Image: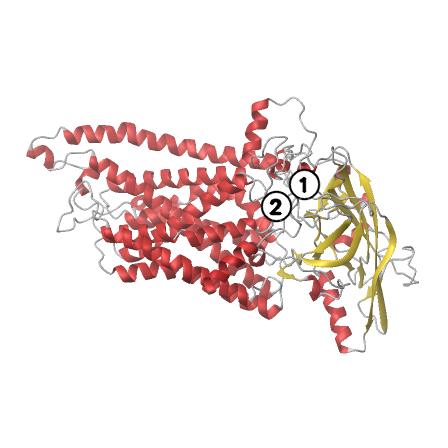
Amino acid sequence: MLCRNVVRFLLRGRSYLPVQPELSDGDPPSCSAAAASSCAASPCVPPHPRAFPVPPSSRPSQPCSRGCPPARSTAVMSPGPRPSSSPRWRWLLLSLLLGAAPGPGSTFYLPGLAPVNFCEEGKESPECKSGIELFVNRLDSVESVLPYEYTAFDFCQAAGGKRPSENLGQVLFGERIEPSPYKFSFKKEETCKIVCTKTYHTDKAEDKQKLEFLKKSMLLNYQHHWIVDNMPVTWCYEVEDGQRFCNPGFPIGCYITDKGRAKDACVINSEFHEKDTFYIFNHVDIKIFYHIVESGAMGARLVAAKLEPKSYKHTHTDKPDCSGPPMDISNKATGEIKIAYTYSVSFHEQKNIRWASRWDYILESMPHTHIQWFSIMNSLVIVLFLSGMVAMIMLRTLHKDIARYNQMDSTEDAQEEFGWKLVHGDIFRPPRKGMLLSVFLGSGTQILIMTFVTLFFACLGFLSPANRGALMTCAVVLWVLLGTPAGYVAARFYKSFGGEKWKTNVLLTSFLCPGIVFADFFTMNLILWGEGSSAAIPFGTLVAILALWFCISVPLTFIGAYFGFKKNAIEHPVRTNQIPRQIPEQSFYTKPLPGIIMGGILPFGCIFIQLFFILNSIWSHQMYYMFGFLFLVFIILVITCSEATILLCYFHLCAEDYHWQWRSFLTSGFTAVYFLIYAIHYFFSKLQIIGTASTILYFGYTMIMVLIFFLFTGTIGFFACFWFVTKIYSVVKVD
């Protein structure tokens, strides 16, 4: 019964928009097509996602021409003009890298992502509605890892309305989408409409606590995230050199320090000047852009929703006019404080934007493409270098070695053997701790296949930003279903290592690595529970995750292990001697530790630029949509790990050191250590996170990523070295 409910929970995840019939106005449906149009490149990495407009007096007179702005810079570089005469093949290649989309005229839509048509009041039909719902998501900050639900703040609440259901990925990421009190009708404009008024008495403990929480959120620059028609409501503003940056969130308010320094969004208004004062954005001007469907009778589709946050101290809260001084709250204010929340909404027809490309204006303000191409070229240079080295070894050195060894007929020649052939009687000797190595290989295989399939689907556009939570849901479901290959690989290699404790092996494969990840995750969740964060996983979801693990993953692992142990042990091309050969004294660079440390440098060099964007998307709340680039980097990483491990494995075999199993795993796996070092550097140099809880959460979740990456890369290195060793010893004559 529990397992059946878990499956229902997974299948329940869907978009909160009603699925309309497959309607087409000639737009390509996949939102990943929007990414392809963002290929206009900028030489600078975009700044912090919470960057704000630079005051006119402090703007530099020259645009960025060399290097890139620092991570905390307030300048945002915008993409340049689109090239009009680029070769067709370049655009085709870029569209594949950014995620393929169906051709024009197609009527294929992802589940829950079909376009919704809107009509004016009185013209509604089953295929066209007039009401536009605005949903609110969690509030987050780049200065804290702790997100909070909208209801945790004392804002205007919706009178009723059904809360949209979230899928597993949204729950794990802490997304909490709720209905809002902001209700619109298509083409019905409103001006300075009151939503609600909040009153605080500082002499009451409850009101004081709510007000202090609101002040703290403004001090840490917490951001609203609103959603209209599955599109983020963006705040677009001018930055350096007249460019525009569109932020898919806007701040609650801002703070002027006791020394008069404007923090965060306070730089946008010269009226924000009172020292030690908070200014709350209690009014929003919302602009909704739409385009008319070509068939005419179907109404219109929304293509953008933008807002501008403002602050007004409404003198008449019953009839606000949205004028006057800003709404300020002194840090030492006492007595009664009233905050009236208002909004204005207007509708504008936009003929140049189609529904399928409505994400473009957001993605274009994040010009990553130039940096991404630089990352790919950097990685390809490393791959070519390693491929040349491996080719030289395989085609020249190994070919000569094999030819010379096979020509040795006399006993005297055999006694003069040297190099890697000398250890043929020990090369397949079972390693120490073979049980642990086989368990790591099983878990690594599970992660490797999961990553490949997830990125492949992401490249096809199935896991686009519009399909919220789909990426994490896909990864978790795949991990659960891939228990069979994990158990099979672990059992197969454990049996080849001469192991007989098959029950212990399958239990460790099922529970060791997943148990470490779950223990870390549960500890982080306890901290989130204690802080009252929306990122805390509900108890029911934890039970569902455990049920997925115990009811599906573990049985599948046992099935895989059963078939793995049932098959005969892996046949090696050479026999293993009964007495181990003594390993000669090794030089410094052929000792295990230096080789392991050197082995992880090149694979990390292929991914560190891509790693920057991934960490930005996780901790700085930026959208990540270039899964095509990520998939290409994934392939390059697999090749680099394999070639670097084979290269070092050959050098160690020539030095007559036959302990290659653990060394090959750790050589590639050491890339995870460089990942950890980079994550520490990123925390101190790029992030503004403060607070003990946020710091513990950052490093706690980082350790989960490091462990997964260690198993993933280590498994690649072992399989590459296993193939290499098996291949070279199968073509040489051994008496």
Total labels drawn:
2
Q: CA distance from mark 2 to mark 1?
A: 9 Å
Tell me, for residue 143, which label it has, or none.
Answer: none
Q: Secondary structure at mark 2?
A: loop
Q: Nearer the viewer, residue 587 or 634?
A: 634
- Against 441, residue 413 (above or below) is above
| Rendered location of residue 240, percent (x, y) | 75, 40
Q: Is residue 416 above or below residue 338?
A: above
Give the residue number, with chain letter if any, for mark 1.
359
In x, y percent, where is residue 344? 84, 51
Residue at figure coordinates x 41%, y 48% from the top left: 712
Cβ atoms at labels 2 and 1 below 8 Å apart: yes
The 10 Å Cα crowd at callout 1, few under 14, some 14 to 19, many 20 or more, is many
Give the vertical position of 728 relative to 534 (above or below): above
Q: Quadrant of residue 322?
A: bottom right
The quadrant holding residue 37 is top right
Specify the amino acid type for callout 1. Trp
728 and 270: which is toward the camera = 728
**Residue 265's spot in the image, x, y percent?**
76, 53
Visible in this render: residue 594?
Answer: no
Residue at 81 percent across and 63 percent down: it is: 277
